[in-house]
Image: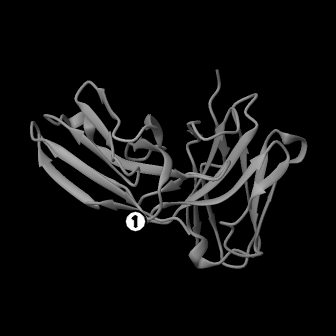
């Protein structure tokens, strides 16, 4: 079974440019999460989809970040325009069902560097 | 909002020594999960604790969940070089389908 896949693995962009990250969750997983880890800090929650609906987007830093999950399959996270402080590793995770006791399966992450 | 604190941030041990990382939540948790991230890798689920006072073991790893369900620990006995990585705790608050809140992680280095 394929795991959570993310693309690209690395991205280096200039401040002010736009970047779109993609996440393909494990097939059949309704729950999809985006997290971000800035160097040396915690893995911080960004948002949570249940199928195509945004269940919780309280962690999104600001309106430069836009996440979509059309059709309830893969998801994209767009940063426009990118700022220096957006640099970090963006992880996507999925889980098979809604509930309290579900583990998250993480993708390899996208390392974003804004210069 | 809910916060999860984890200490220490770094730990360097000689191979064969024991290692412990501690996790504390600002709120009572429904469950706590532990993940391991190898250098250059992604977080991989290790275990989940649900019950108050629960203790689980995986070979040399012992996981505990506090009686008040606000703290947890991971103890590794006789560390090996394969234990190198960052260990994260992640807590889930009560009140429905809330997201996991991660601690900052403890980076473990093992010197052979």
| A68 in relation to A18, above or below | above
Residue at the far top in the pictured view: A1
Q: Which residue is mark 1?
A: A40
Horizontally, residue A7 falls left or right of residue B28, namely: right
Q: Nearer the viewer, residue A84 or B50?
A: B50
Disc 1 is placed on an element classified as loop
Residue at figure coordinates x 61%, y 71% from the top left: A86
Q: Residue at x 69, y 67 (%)?
A: A60
Q: Above or below — where is B2 with respect to A7? A: below
In this rendering, would A78 be left or right of B97? right
**Residue B18, located in which quarter of the rendered image?**
top left
Q: What quarter of the picture does the C terminus of chain B occupy?
A: top left
- How many numbered circles are shown? 1
- On the image, the x and y values in percent for residue A108 come to 55, 43
Q: Quadrant of residue A54?
A: bottom right
Residue A33 percent across, percent down from the top left? 67, 49
* Image quarter of the N terminus of chain B: bottom right
Task: Report whether A7 appears left or right of A28.
Answer: left
Residue A62 place in picture, x, y as percent: 72, 76
Asked if one can make out residue A115 in the rendered structure from this viewpoint, the answer is no
Q: Residue at x 18, y 45 (%)?
A: B19
- Badge 1: how crowded within 10 Å, few (<14), some, or many (20+)? few
Residue toward you, A3 or B64: B64
* Host chain of mark 1: A
Q: Position of residue B34 (x, y in %)?
A: 41, 42
Q: How is the image coloured?
A: one colour
Q: Is residue B98 visible?
A: yes
Residue in front for this viewpoint, B95 or A19: B95
């Amino acid at each position: 079974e394929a795991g959570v896949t993310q693309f690209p693995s690395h991205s280096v962009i200039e401040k002010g440019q736009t970047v779109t990250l993609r996440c393909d969750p494990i097939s059949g997983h309704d729950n999809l999460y985006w997290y971000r880890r800035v160097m040396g800090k915690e893995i911080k929650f960004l948002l949570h989809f249940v199928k195509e609906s945004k269940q919780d987007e309280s962690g999104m830093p600001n309106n430069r970040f836009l996440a979509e999950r059309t059709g309830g399959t893969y998801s994209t996270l767009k940063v426009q325009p990118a700022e220096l402080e957006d640099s970090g590793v963006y992880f996507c995770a999925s889980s098979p069902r809604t509930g309290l006791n579900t583990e998250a399966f993480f993708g390899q992450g996208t390392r974003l560097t804004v210069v | 909002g809910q916060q999860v604190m984890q200490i220490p941030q770094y730990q360097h041990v000689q191979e064969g020594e024991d290692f412990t990382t501690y996790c504390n939540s600002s709120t009572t948790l429904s469950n706590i999960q532990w993940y391991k991230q190898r250098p250059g890798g992604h977080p991989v689920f290790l275990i989940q604790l649900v019950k108050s006072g629960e203790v689980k073991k995986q070979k040399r790893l012992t996981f505990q969940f506090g009686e008040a369900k606000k703290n947890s620990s991971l103890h590794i006995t006789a560390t090996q070089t394969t234990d190198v990585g960052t260990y994260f705790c992640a807590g889930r608050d009560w009140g429905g389908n809330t997201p996991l809140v991660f601690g900052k992680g403890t980076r473990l280095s093992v010197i052979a």
